[in-house]
Amino acid sequence: VKGKAKRAGKQARPVNGVAVLGAGIMGGGIAYQSARKGVPAVMKDIAQPALELGLNEASKLLAKQVERGRMKPAQMAGVLNNIVPSLDYSAIKHADVVVEAVVENPKVKGIVLAEAEEILRDDAVLTSNTSTISINALAKNLKRPENFCGMHFFNPVHRMPLVEIIRGEHSSEETVSTVVAYAAKMGKTPIVVNDCPGFFVNRVLFPYFFGFNLLLRDGADFQQVDKVMSKQFGWPMGPAYLLDVVGIDTAHHAVAVMAEGFPTRMSKSFRDAVDIMFEAERFGQKNGKGFYQYA
Ligand code: NAD
């Protein structure tokens, strides 16, 4: 992948400043990682508390780096200065790359992407961090689909090495190369994949969640499943805890997209635990209650 990133770099446009749309779990993490690696990031949201939460998370992560002796306090201030919160679109107009990371809803994403495109330079690259929604479908909202592709990070952004770069049917080589080079600059391992619902990773991960929900329907206890999959099977965490980390609302939207994309393989005929928790607004760690209760 490093070799590929280098080769791709030949056609890549320089990335000196970026913008992230949505300052939630992912947007906040992407802005932090970008700024940490020297690429200033505007962080745009529609809600002031979301911006504050994003900045607080970044501060906490940086404070840990200082505590561990990996960063000087002055550097910490420099990185924080490179995350520019904004409620206003005009702040993104000089961005070389934009990563859209708003809610996993095709309509909302379509509107946000089109609004961003209006503000950006003609040669700016627009990307979506969608987990599951087809990049070709999202591109239909745009006037310059050649400047658009998927840039799918994983949670938590600062720890997960992989970034899927999704090539849409209209994405230009230059667009894909620019995003590959930017991901490498962020210290990530980019892989370029073709477009389809769920791309690569979520085509593997969602059948796992699906199997987990079937187990629950058949009477399994989620804590026991988590214990077996983590402590005994050896994965970092079990499926219930992972769903709480991802966000039950995000997972709920994503399951619907996967079911629509793969009706014979991913459709379910029952109301599962994710549906029930979504309806009860138990969104996982982000609002303190999901499968587990968080203080
Ligand atoms: P989140 O709910 O934590 O954050 C979404 C943010 O978008 C909120 O702060 C909200 O205020 C903001 N927002 C909503 N509408 C907006 C608009 N019109 N303009 C600007 N901001 C707006 O969600 P998240 O978990 O960060 O997920 C964001 C995206 O990243 C989704 O597409 C999701 O599928 C994807 N993703 C999530 C994960 C994960 O584990 N949570 C992993 C990979 C990708």
Image: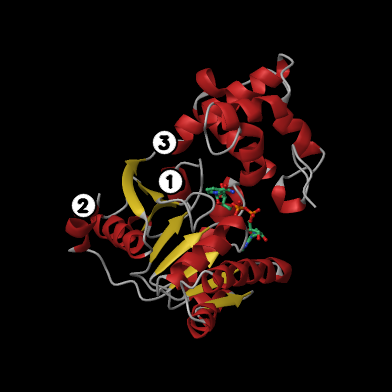
At x 82%, y 39%, the residue is: 280
Q: Where is residue 204 in the image (x, y as percent from the top left)?
A: 46, 30
Tell me the distance, in whole angstroms, between the alpha carbons under discs 2 and 1. Answer: 22 Å
Name the residue rendered at 71%, 18% in the picture: 220
Q: Percent x, y for residue 265?
A: 51, 19
Calculate the distance from the C-alpha at mark 3 to the C-alpha at mark 2: 22 Å
Residue 82 vertical position relative to residue 11 in the rendered view, above or below: below
Residues packed near mark 1 inside 10 Å, few (<14), some (14 to 19) or many (20 plus) = many
Quickly name the residue at label 2.
4
Residue for point 64% across, 74% down: 87
Instruction: Check disc 2 and give the amino acid type.
Output: Lys
- Amino acid type at circle 3 is Cys
Closest to the observer, 245 or 237: 237
Marks 3 and 2: which is nearer the front? 2
SS of the residue under disc 2: helix
Which residue is at the front of the view, 110 or 104? 104
Relative to 242, residue 145 above or below: below
Q: Report the residue marked by disc 3.
A: 196
In which quadrant of the rendered view does residue 200 lie?
Answer: top left
At horizontal 62% and vertical 52% (from top left) the residue drawn is 103
Q: Residue furthest bottom?
A: 74
